[in-house]
Image (spheres, helix red, strand yellow):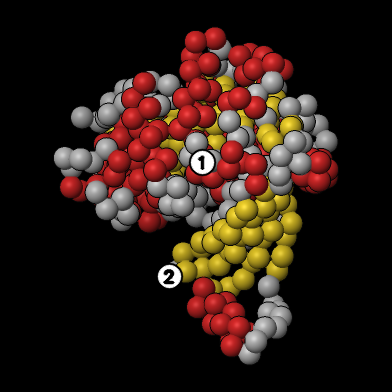
């Protein structure tokens, strides 16, 4: 039975650390880079009614939206956020020569691009950012490019060397990969047998690749190959459903907010893995029969695509710097909040996070109520 632990409610120790110098820990992140094209509009109904009207007239131009072109993909976004925190992220990615040039132009020049393969195909996503049923959502239309077939066999000797030396290896965006479970098993088996680092996994939304989760459950998680499993409220439903042969409660896979944390408890009870749950209203860390939770910060987002990547970066930073789990959640929530409210889709610096926390930002009332009612 999981016991809820209450963390301290002051941000002072976290702010003090963020204002100090720290060791730039090494993180290897793979395997995706996307060119992201954000289309920012108002609400779902008005946008798609306008689209339908244009289609009915035989085509035309929909005006009044805001467009942003940015670096994308879970791996590159997470690496970008970690770089702004003073970490040393190393992405391992396959794209093409055009993709490499775009990547160079879209990321900070100090990001290590020595492990970018250019013998593949560029991946791209159009993310339509709007409000549906009172909640900001992002509708992503993607071409997976080389991410769909990225495999362990593509790794070079140089790639293997940095993977073995890394303090943490983060495998992301498996939902786009046709053989994601094989990649996870082979990669994490290498780290467990020959490497020194922790293994971190976030699959992304598996709804377009539903076989992935069952394979990961039975071939990767059950073998103890994953140290940290990061999931959002949608993904935890998929994992709970894959484990729910004798638990009808989880079979639908689609959960309401009161079930998110219960599903995380259910999954964490089945494997020797630390489950990190991030939702629009709260986040939670579950390990060794204990739960640490904290509400999200109440902010008005400009975009939502990439919020999970920012959250993961904050969690990884806290983990490698030895933070208490409560402080890890606060940092990850703050980093995500600042990212989704940024006008130009940039990741915050340590100084910006410190200033945000020093301002005593409002926490989500919905998140607080959900945690109190569990």
- Mark 1, residue position: 178
Per the image, label 2 sits on a secondary structure element best described as loop
Q: Nearer the viewer, mark 1 or mark 2?
A: 1
Residue 296: image location, x then y, percent = 46, 48
Q: What element carries label 1?
A: loop
> Looking at the image, which is closer to me, 202 or 100?
100
Q: In this view, does 221 lie to the left or right of 2?
A: right
Mark 1–mark 2 Cα distance, whole angstroms, equals 32 Å
Query: Which one is in front, 373 or 112?
Result: 112
| Residue at which label 2 appears | 133
Tell me where residue 314 sits by quadrant: top right
Could you say where residue 111 lies in the image, as x and y percent from the top left? 77, 32
Q: How crowded is mark 2: few (under 14 residues within 10 Å), some or many (20 or more)?
A: few
Residue 279 appears in the picture as rendered = no
Q: Residue placed at 78% from the left, 26% from the top? A: 114
Q: Which residue is drawn at 57% across and 58% down?
A: 140
User: What is the number of the mark on residue 330?
Assistant: none
């Amino acid at each position: 039975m999981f016991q809820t632990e209450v963390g301290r409610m002051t941000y002072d120790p976290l702010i003090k650390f963020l204002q100090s110098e720290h060791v730039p820990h090494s993180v290897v992140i793979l395997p995706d880079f996307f060119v992201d094209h954000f289309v920012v509009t108002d609400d779902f109904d008005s946008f798609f009614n306008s689209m339908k009207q244009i289609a009915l007239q035989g085509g035309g131009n929909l005006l009044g939206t805001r467009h942003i072109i940015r670096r994308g993909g879970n791996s590159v976004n997470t690496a970008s956020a970690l770089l702004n925190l003073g970490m040393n992220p190393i992405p391992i990615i396959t794209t093409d020569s055009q993709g490499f040039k775009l990547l160079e132009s879209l990321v900070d020049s100090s990001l290590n691009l020595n492990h970018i393969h250019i013998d593949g195909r560029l991946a791209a996503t159009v993310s339509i950012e709007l409000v549906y049923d009172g909640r900001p959502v992002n509708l992503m239309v993607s071409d997976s490019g080389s991410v769909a077939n990225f495999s362990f066999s593509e790794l070079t000797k140089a790639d293997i060397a940095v993977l073995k030396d890394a303090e943490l290896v983060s495998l992301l965006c498996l939902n786009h990969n046709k053989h994601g479970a094989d990649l996870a098993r082979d990669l994490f088996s290498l780290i467990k047998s020959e490497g020194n680092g922790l293994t971190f996994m976030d699959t992304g939304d598996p709804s377009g690749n539903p076989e992935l989760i069952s394979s990961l459950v039975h071939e990767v998680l059950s073998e103890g190959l994953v140290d940290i499993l990061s999931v959002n409220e949608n993904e935890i439903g998929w994992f709970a459903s894959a484990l729910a042969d004798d638990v009808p409660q989880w079979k639908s896979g689609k959960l309401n907010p009161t079930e998110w944390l219960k599903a995380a408890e259910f999954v964490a009870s089945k494997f020797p893995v630390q489950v990190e749950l991030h939702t629009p209203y709260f986040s939670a860390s579950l390990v060794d029969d204990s739960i640490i939770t904290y509400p999200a910060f109440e902010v008005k987002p400009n975009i939502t695509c990439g919020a999970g990547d920012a959250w993961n970066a904050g969690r990884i930073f806290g983990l490698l710097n030895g933070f208490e789990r409560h402080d890890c959640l606060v940092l990850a929530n703050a980093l995500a909040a600042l990212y989704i409210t940024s006008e130009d889709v940039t990741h915050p610096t340590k100084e910006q996070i410190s200033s945000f926390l020093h301002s005593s930002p409002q926490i989500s009332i919905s998140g607080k109520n959900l945690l109190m009612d569990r």
